[in-house]
Amino acid sequence: MSDKARKQFEKEVLKGLSAKEKSLPSKYFYDEKGDKIFQEIMRMDEYYLTNSEFEILSMRKEEILKRITEVFGDKEFLLIEFGAGDGFKTKLILEHLLEAKVKFQYRPVDISESVLKELKTELTQKLPQLNCRPLVGTYAKSLKELDDDSPKLLFFLGSNLGNFDKKAARGFIKKIYKRLHKDDLVFFGIDLKKDPRVILQAYNDPKGITKAFNLNLLARINRELGGDFDLNQFDHYPLYDPKSGICKSYLISRKAQVVNLSALNAQFELQYAEEIQTEVSIKYSLEEVERMFSQAGFDHLEHFFDCKHYFLDTLWKKPVK
């Protein structure tokens, strides 16, 4: 972690734990251990998001390719993926594009340097002909990559948009629209509203892997900021509101306790049953998705669903105006 990134980490942890309603940013889940735990989560049967989107990309890759080439023709383009992670699903599309001899360059963007190093190593071995240049950074910081004059296809898979609140999601899509040029494409993964029990199981698995993922954030604070969180004194609790589509995750204090962070010279009191919000994941209706992108100015090209309609990958274009 760079000095600048560390200072930002310190600032956001201090702000979140000092607030009346305590919270910690979910982007800090992803240290080296957190990356590995999340890969376990993605392999869980309960975590339908990965399997649903993998089904879409594997079953509909020919149609996705057709739509892309209808817009770009034989021009080379940049495929920029925000929140690339381990690239498990994206590799399907990368392989298909290469097999079809489509001319493109791949720019995976992620906040985790370790996961990008692993991705780059794997892609170099499995797809040596791929032009791949990873970029470490946040979504906001990486928006400058969209200023390139090359035609662009922006990938935003895995329902990462759901980690924004609805106002921020609308704002983010509008920022992307303003940065893109005419005929540039965006391809977003969106988790759809569905049976609340299915959603809750994805965030509260019986093996406790998601709990370990959340608790690892406290372990990271202990290690990097000199904290003394006792992980045994916190429970993980998810909550889903089917009307708003908002799923939240909390760490609940099992007793009244005081936590010290020596690197920040700070101390925080937690009451019995006090919560620390660690994640927000928003689920959308199809109507909400279409309204959000069309109001930003995009033209709709096609929706791609899994067989259960649990998940949506949606393709939009910046029109010529």
Image (tube, rainbow, N blue to C red):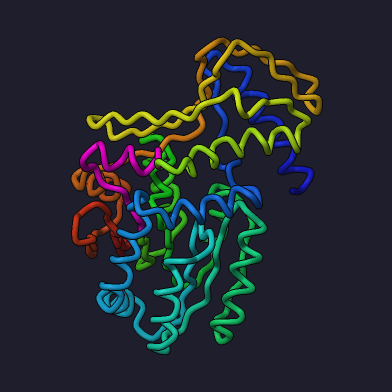
User: What residue do we see at 29% from left, 50% from top?
Assistant: 293
Q: Going 41% across and 53% down the picture, which residue do you hit? A: 44
Q: Quarter-wise, where is residue 117 in the image?
A: bottom right
Q: Residue at x 66, y 57 (%)?
A: 113
Residue that extends furthest to the front in the rendered view of this protein: 207
Q: Position of residue 102 (x, y in %)?
A: 41, 85
The location of residue 306, given as percent across then percent down, is 23, 61
The segment highlighted magenta reads 188-205
Q: Nearer the viewer, residue 80 or 174?
A: 80
**Relative to 9, is 47 above or below?**
below
> Which residue is pictured at 44% across the width and 68% down the height?
90
Residue 59 visible:
yes
Q: Is residue 147 visible?
A: no
* Residue 204 drawn in magenta: yes
Is residue 227 positioned above or below 64 on the image? above
The foreground one among 234 and 117 is 234
Number of labels in the image equals: 0
Eyeballing the image, is 223 above or below 113?
above
Q: Is residue 270 left or right of residue 46?
A: right
Q: Give 270 or 158, whichever is nearer the viewer.
A: 270
Question: Residue 208: percent from the left, percent from the top?
Answer: 47, 40
Closer-to-camera residue (52/103): 52
Image quarter hosting the C terminus: bottom left
Question: Left or right: 211 with respect to 262?
Answer: left
Q: Is residue 193 magenta?
A: yes
Image coordinates of residue 144 in percent, x first then y, are: 57, 56
